[in-house]
């Protein structure tokens, strides 16, 4: 496929990996990022991986005039929208900021698209929209809800996109519900680079493995799971990136939107992830059992039927490859560049 794509949040963790996949697929990509949770140096590293200059423009999706000027100057065929805030815990303490960036920011992008006849968007959603009540594995038509402001903004974004699609036949959206993205590009020069102490499991374990943090706190070992610890559907970020390319190809080819889970359909427990990371880094990682984390549920796992049927997507990498790629990223030290 070819086309000129606007990639918002394209220097971030998932955005940067998706940039590489889009370029590899033949797309022409313009990246915007406000650098609130990404380093400008990622643009140069992306150029290293793709062997072509990265067309990066520093721009905030809250800058409505800046967005409209960009869309006016460039003829985009589609948008892949990652720009947003994604920390569940932070969203509880800063709900208005999350609605501002994740909902008003999306609305600004959609307004600029509409004003310039751009009718195709891939939207970064999340498995947190399944709340906690759905049956496992989570199917896309399961009841949705939210238990925190972050999930609320993602569900609202989905509803806005579905509302526009219902009244504008020339508009279509690929709504992708991520489960737990982890790992790093095989080159080791891009990866997850959290600003401060990570909330999520794998980046936290990575810092224990590199001895930046003393040990992992396992949030509860009394769940109704085989080993008592929480189970999640971890998916390699490069598999996730490929899912975005398949979603975009489908939208541009068919003009029809979709809502699709991006996961592996296989869950791994905290203990299994710890053991796998230990195999990757070569030592048994220290941990302590701590109380459950508020809001956590025992298990989340994706039903992957629709991703395969609609997009021809199936994750290819397993837990050991996810951990090995994460550890390779840590050992190359590129994040300190
Ligand atoms: C995974 C498992 C924890 C940290 C979150 C967001 C979700 C998505 C992915 C954006 C759980 C356990 C964790 C730790 C632990 N992000 N854990 N010790 O909560 O499934 O999903 O990130 O879209 O929206 O909710 O991911 O990595 O935080 O937790 O024991 O220090 O690891 O209890 O079982 P989660 P996570």
Image (cartoon, rainbow, N blue to C red):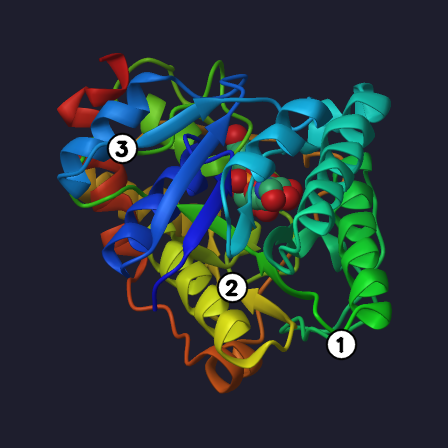
Quarter of the figure with residue 264: bottom left
- Mark 3 and mark 1 residues within 8 Å of each other at the beta carbon: no
Please report contact status of discs 2 and 3: CB closer than 8 Å, yes or no. no
| CA distance separating discs 2 and 3 | 21 Å
- The quadrant the C terminus occupies is top left
Instruction: Please report whichever mark, 2 or 3, sits nearer to the chain's N-terminal start.
Output: 3
Q: Which quarter of the frame holds ligand 1?
A: top right
Label 2 to label 1, Cα distance in Å?
Answer: 14 Å
User: Is residue 218 visible from the viewing direction of this image?
Assistant: no
Instruction: Determine whether the residue tagged by mark 3 lies in a helix, strand or loop.
Output: loop
The N terminus appears in which quarter of the rendering?
bottom left
Asked whether residue 241 appears in the rendered view, the answer is yes
Query: Does residue 334 appear left or right of residue 173 in this picture?
Result: left
The CA span between labels 3 and 1 is: 34 Å
Q: Which of the two residues, 67 or 300, is positioned nearer the viewer here?
A: 67
Position above or below: 127 against 143: above
Name the spot of residue 9 as percent of width and height, x first: 51, 33
Residue located 68% across and 36% down the image: 292
- The numbered mark, 3 or 1, whose residue comes first in the sequence reads 1
Element on which disc 1 rests: loop
Residue identifier under label 3: 190
Q: Which mark is residue 141?
A: 1
Number of labels in the image equals 3
Residue 262, disc = 2
Q: Residue at x 45, y 55 (%)?
A: 234
Tell me if residue 307 comes above or below residue 276 in the rendering: below
Name the spot of residue 249 as percent of width and height, x first.
44, 70
State the SS at label 2: strand
- The percent coordinates of residue 44 (x first, y second) are 23, 24
Q: Residues within 10 Å of mark 1 (few under 14, many from 20)?
A: few
> Quick check: marks 2 and 1 in contact, CB under 8 Å?
no
Q: Which mark is residue 251?
A: none
């Amino acid at each position: 496929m070819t086309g000129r794509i606007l990639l918002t949040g394209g220097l971030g963790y998932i955005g940067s990996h998706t940039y590489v996949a889009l370029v590899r697929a033949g797309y022409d990509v313009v990246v915007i990022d406000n650098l609130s949770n990404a380093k400008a140096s990622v643009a140069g590293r992306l150029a290293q991986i793709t062997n072509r200059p990265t067309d990066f423009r520093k721009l905030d999706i809250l800058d409505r005039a800046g967005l409209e000027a960009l869309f006016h100057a460039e003829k985009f065929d589609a948008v892949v929208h990652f720009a947003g805030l994604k920390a569940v815990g932070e969203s509880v303490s800063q709900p208005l900021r999350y609605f501002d960036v994740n909902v008003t920011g999306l609305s600004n992008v959609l307004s600029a698209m509409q004003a310039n006849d751009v009718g195709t968007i891939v939207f970064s959603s999340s498995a947190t929209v399944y709340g906690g009540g759905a049956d496992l594995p989570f199917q896309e038509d399961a009841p949705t809800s939210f238990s925190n402001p972050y999930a609320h903004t993602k569900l609202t974004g989905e509803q806005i996109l579905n509302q526009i699609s219902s009244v504008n036949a020339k508009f279509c959206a690929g709504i992708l519900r991520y489960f737990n993205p982890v790992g790093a590009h095989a080159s080791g020069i891009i990866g997850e680079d959290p600003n401060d102490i990570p909330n999520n499991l794998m980046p936290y374990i990575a810092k224990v493995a590199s001895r930046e943090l003393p040990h992992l706190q396992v949030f509860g070992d009394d769940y109704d799971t085989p080993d008592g610890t929480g189970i999640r559907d971890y998916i390699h970020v490069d598999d996730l990136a490929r899912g975005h390319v398949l979603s975009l190809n489908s939208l541009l080819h068919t003009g029809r939107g979709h809502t699709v889970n991006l996961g592996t359909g296989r869950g791994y427990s905290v203990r299994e992830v710890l053991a796998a990371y230990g195999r990757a880094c070569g030592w048994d990682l220290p941990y302590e059992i701590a109380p459950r984390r508020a809001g956590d549920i025992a298990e989340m796992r994706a039903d992957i039927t629709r991703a395969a049927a609609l997009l021809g997507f199936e994750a290819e990498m397993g837990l050991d490859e996810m951990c090995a790629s994460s550890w390779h990223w840590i050992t190359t030290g590129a994040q300190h560049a």
